[in-house]
């Protein structure tokens, strides 16, 4: 007997690709969208698709996923970000697996991501195996800075097909996300007792570029590989610089006193 499955999507102002995302999950018994108070057309798109739509303030990926999973009513979950969709091959692989589910906690699937003018085949972006199909209650979600990941509680398998990912609409959006990720990452470093600083920022930024462009063969991804490596270096530099920032910029009391 085929196992039941929920398609799960967390959203925030995801109108750009949400309809395609939800369409790729239409084979699921139910689609659950947990929204963080979007102000664009996200709610209307979800409503038109007939999904179950819940709203909750964003407190970070771990609390949000725990809330979402507490509201899942099926044995299995297929989790997608709002800018991802399943290929036809992966849809069929999931359906075949659910028809006779193996004794596993979950299944890894590969993801290919579009950047600048192509799908990256190197640069540390591909292959990108992620646990996105899993049994409810046999997965643990963790976060490092602004990034989350799922960890199986038991054996796993791999499925044929891919998730297609379009993470950025433009360079501006990429820079906006780098700004956000660097802020969250800088705070996480401070919480671990690491002070960061200019020297650490330059060193980590340089190594990040070297890793993505040379070690991860980003040079084989053409202009997109170079741009991605440069953006990665800027993120690492900003993260360690922000870890050293103790407060808002501007004159300190001591400076004002010395000028009096």
Image (spheres, helix red, strand yellow):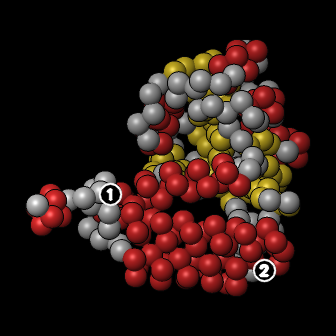
Q: Which residue is mark 1?
A: 249
Instruction: Give residue 115's quadrant in the image.
Output: bottom right
- Relative image position of residue 70 (x, y in whole percent): 47, 28
Q: Nearer the viewer, residue 92 or 204?
A: 204
Q: Which residue is mark 2?
A: 219
- Relative image position of residue 221 (x, y in whole percent): 82, 73
Mark 1, Cα crowd under 10 Å, few <14 / some 14-19 / many 20+, is few
Report whether 77 appears left or right of 201.
Answer: right
- Relative image position of residue 91 (x, y in whole percent): 82, 40
Residue at 66 percent of width and 48 percent of height: 173
Using the rendered image of the protein, determine whether residue 74 is visible from the camera's viewpoint: no
Residue at 63 percent of width and 52 percent of height: 131
In the displayed orientation, state which residue is furthest to the right: 88
Mark 2, Cα crowd under 10 Å, few <14 / some 14-19 / many 20+, is some
Using the rendered image of the protein, determine whether residue 56 is visible from the camera's viewpoint: yes
Q: Is residue 260 above or below residue 7?
A: below
């Amino acid at each position: 007997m085929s196992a039941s499955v929920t398609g799960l999507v967390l959203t925030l102002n995801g109108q750009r690709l949400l309809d395609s995302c939800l369409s790729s999950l239409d084979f699921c018994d139910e689609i659950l969208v947990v929204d963080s108070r979007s102000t664009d057309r996200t709610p209307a798109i979800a409503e038109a698709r007939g999904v179950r739509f819940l709203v909750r303030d964003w407190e970070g990926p771990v609390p949000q996923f725990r809330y979402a999973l507490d509201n899942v009513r099926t044995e299995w979950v297929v989790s997608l970000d709002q800018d991802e969709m399943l290929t036809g091959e992966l849809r069929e692989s999931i359906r075949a697996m659910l028809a006779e589910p193996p004794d596993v906690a979950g299944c890894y699937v590969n993801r290919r991501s579009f950047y600048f003018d192509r799908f990256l085949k190197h640069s540390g972006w591909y292959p990108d195996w992620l646990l996105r199909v899993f049994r409810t209650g046999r997965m643990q979600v963790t976060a490092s800075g602004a990034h989350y990941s799922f960890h199986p509680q038991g054996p796993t398998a791999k499925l044929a097909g891919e998730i297609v990912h379009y993470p950025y609409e433009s360079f501006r959006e990429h820079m906006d996300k780098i700004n956000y990720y660097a802020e969250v990452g800088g705070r996480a470093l401070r919480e671990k007792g690491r002070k960061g600083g200019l020297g650490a920022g330059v060193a980590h930024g340089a190594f990040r570029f070297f890793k993505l462009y040379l070690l991860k063969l980003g040079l084989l991804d053409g202009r997109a590989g170079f741009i991605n490596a440069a953006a990665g270096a800027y993120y690492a530099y900003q993260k360690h610089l922000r870890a050293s920032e103790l407060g808002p910029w501007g004159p300190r009391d001591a400076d004002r006193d010395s000028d009096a």
